[in-house]
Image (cartoon, rainbow, N blue to C red):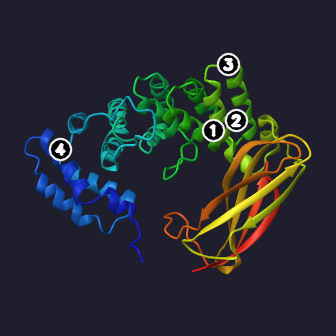
Amino acid sequence: MAERFSLKDHLFNEETIGQLAAEYAAALPNFDADAFHSEVLAGLPERQLLERLDWIADCLEPRLSSQFPAMAAQLEAAMPAPLDPTLKDDDFGQFIHAVPGILAVRHGLELHRDRALDLLHAATQRFSMELYIRPFLNRWPEETLKRLTLWTEDENYHVRRLVSEGTRHRLPWAKAIHLTPGQTLPLLDRLHADGTRYVTRSVANHLNDITKIDPARVIRHLADWRRQGRQTQTELDWMTRHALRTLIKSGHAETMEFLGYRRDVPVRAALTLGAAQARIGDQLRVDAILEADEDLSVIVDYRVIFARPGGKRAEKVFKLKVGKMTAGKPLKVGKNHRFKGDATTFTLHPGVHQVVLQVNGQDVARAEVMLKA
């Protein structure tokens, strides 16, 4: 059996810690790169991913000035060049460069707010400071929101993305923030027409978070953006689908109406699976044929209902097709579904799994597969 991928070891290892040590040694006189490297590596095995970042900060902190303004200057001096500003998406940077954010919170939050925010502004151009802006939003909401409003017009798209990503209501891995949609939506109003997908994806993800709090408000906001016409139609259509994806999967009536999809879908559907049994790690063919007596716009998904220990169930929705049906003409859709045995966030278990075909959020057909170890 192949060795399971370890994200924490991929991100933090002899090579990446050596790179970080070299960056600080090049910027700071008398920085002992070898000692720092050895100390960090010795403490990695016992720690999980985010704990490793705190540990790196623990090892770095005694080697820096105890006065935060001077510490911030040292952290900035050791930063690598900003991420390529000519790119438009998925240039996330390296986790090792999150350390300035940790130290900004530890030493700048209470007594050096403005200098710490300056540090986060510089650091997020190397690695997203989305986790570390949040303590400032909780401690200094008005002051931090004022700074973020300025950053919506920053020339660096990583800074603009931070405004949206750092204020998300359900940001993965992050601590909760005490902001309301009424406080964060004005920031999105300034960002939704951004020309960079990295920013608009964050805006859409932020809206998707808010749909779990106030779906009607999100729909009204998207409708207002449509009327404004500041974003290209293609990009706004993509943002709208992405922002409403959770509501689409649940068949939310107002969402379907807003997007122009009928919930009373008059379709006949047949769902077939490539095999009655599969093993964890296998690919299973999922095919469907849909027919209707009138032209229809459709969102076709399938939902897997996973068997869990103790008779429990868990579900996840997967995309098949967004398109149009022509009256009297069969629509054939399908894909290979892999039952991932190496997923880092979800563990599969043997048992009967159900596959449910959805059209416009409504169940129209189902089948079963026995999953074996």
* Residue indicated by mark 1: 207
SS type, badge 4:
helix
Q: Quadrant of the N terminus?
A: bottom left
Q: Disc 4 marks which amino acid? A: Tyr
Residue 288, can we see it?
yes
How far apart marks 1 and 2 lie (CA) works out to: 6 Å
Sequence-earlier tag: 3 or 2: 2
Q: Quadrant of the C terminus?
A: bottom right
- Whether tag 1 and tag 2 are in contact, CB under 8 A, the answer is yes
Q: Name the image quarter holding residue 65.
A: top left
Which residue: 32% across, 69% down?
A: 46
| Relative vertical location of residue 196 with respect to residue 12 in this rendering, above or below | above
How far apart marks 4 and 1 lie (CA) works out to: 39 Å
Q: In the rendered view, does 345 fall on the left or right side of 78?
A: right
Which residue: 79% across, 56% down?
A: 289
- Whether tag 3 and tag 4 are in contact, CB under 8 A, the answer is no
Q: Residue 358: percent from the left, percent from the top?
A: 77, 55
SS type, badge 2:
helix
Q: Disc 3 marks which amino acid? A: Gln
Residue positioned most to the left: 30
Sequence-earlier tag: 3 or 4: 4
Sequence-earlier tag: 4 or 2: 4
Q: Residue 93: percent from the left, percent from the top?
A: 36, 43
How far apart marks 3 and 1 lie (CA) works out to: 18 Å
- Which of the two discs, 3 and 4, sits closer to the camera? 3
* Residue indicated by mark 3: 228
* Residue indicated by mark 4: 24
